[in-house]
Image: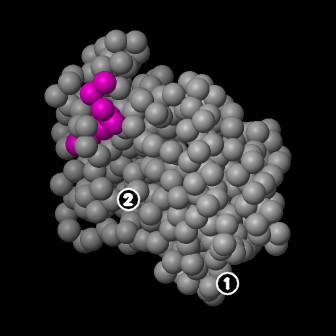
Amino acid sequence: MITDNFKDQKILFLSVKLFDYENIIADKLRSLGAKVDYYDERPANSIFVKGIIRLNRDFYKNKIDNYYRGIVTEIEKKKYDYFFLIKGEVVPAHFIEKVKALNPNIVLLYYTFDSFRNNSNGIEILKHFDRKFTFDSKDANDYNINLRPLFFSDIYTSSKSTQTSNIDLLFIGTAHSDRYVISETLVNWCKNNNLRSYAFYYSPSRLVFLFFKLLDSSFKKFKYNKISFKSLNHIQIAKLYNKSKVVLDINHPNQKGLTMRVFEVLGSGNKLITTNSEIKKYPFYNSNNIYIIDRNNIKIDKSFFDVPFQKIEPQIYESMSITGWLNELFFQGNNFDWIS
């Protein structure tokens, strides 16, 4: 895999903060030889600010504009080869235009790991970019942009040891939609089948959890003592994968794109149970490693837990890695057939 192309490339990188992936990406680019200036896409990350941005970004327009004027002041004397934006939840068009004016030969690169139905600003700014990618196959077709699935970071590469797994089924995830109902159904199924399970549920705040508990019917039975208001870091997650045989992935019902969990699980050599039937279309799909369940009618063949993981073909595995992801976004374009 060619990575020398990143050497001495100057990259202006903006992304929302999400479980430290923004730093993982920036650090990987630097390790490949790029010079990266990273800025948080949002002016602030409090629950209040995130809520205002999602409900009506215009209410926060002055703060957003002032924030981006501040970034322009810091970068206006620098020169960049690439402007790399992930998601584009609040980035104003005038900022993108200013970056282009300051760097006439810059390549504008856009990627989103969220569906556009959750991010109207992303749709509005697409026209400004030279390269455009999404993790969602439906959005790729609807908006005529490239499909590029997510990745696993280096910490999940070959993390599986030869030690005996003491967790048969593992679930780690943010509490939303029907995740609790599905995961608890599988936890109980494990109990009835003499299998060991562990579920870790995360919520960004008590206020958010109580809000969903009051308004979302799927949260009515969610016990407060089962929720954590502190997320696991990647080292902790990798260690849990190393102790586990199978990991459960529950995609948001409104998204077709494969979650980061899918790639981290498979990258670390673990088997996967998922609610996302779209995974059948991808080149790494293997029924020996991946079991698809119907979120409305959950049925599992216990024998899936007994069959060992089969290694993924090396070229596909490399393409699933963070290095493969960055290489495709920056240099290769859409030259890999991700969906059959």
**N-terminal of the two: label 2 or label 1?**
1
Q: Residues within 10 Å of mark 2 (few under 14, many from 20)?
A: many
Q: Nearer the viewer, residue 231 or 239?
A: 231
Q: Amino acid at mark 2?
A: Asn
Q: Nearer the viewer, residue 203 or 16?
A: 16
Dot 2 lies on which element?
loop
Q: Is residue 21 left or right of residue 101?
A: left
Q: Which residue is mark 2?
A: 270
Q: Which residue is mark 1?
A: 5
Q: Position of residue 68 (x, y in %)?
A: 61, 50
Q: Residue at x 28, y 63 (%)?
A: 235
Q: Amino acid at mark 1?
A: Asn
Dot 1 lies on which element?
helix
Q: Inspect the magenta stretch and tell me whether residue 202 lies in it.
A: yes
Q: Residue at x 82, y 48 (%)?
A: 127
Q: Is residue 322 left or right of residue 195?
A: right
Q: Position of residue 113 (x, y in %)?
A: 58, 48
Q: Inspect the magenta stretch and tell me whether residue 260 lies in it.
A: no
Q: Taking 337 as reference, is 225 above or below it? A: above
Q: Taking 330 as reference, is 58 above or below it? A: above
| Cα separation between marks 2 and 1 | 32 Å
In the rendered structure, which segment of residues is drawn in magenta? 197-207
Residue contact at pointers 2 and 1, CB within 8 angstroms: no
Q: Position of residue 53 (x, y in %)?
A: 55, 32
In this view of the protein, can residue 299 be seen by the observer? no
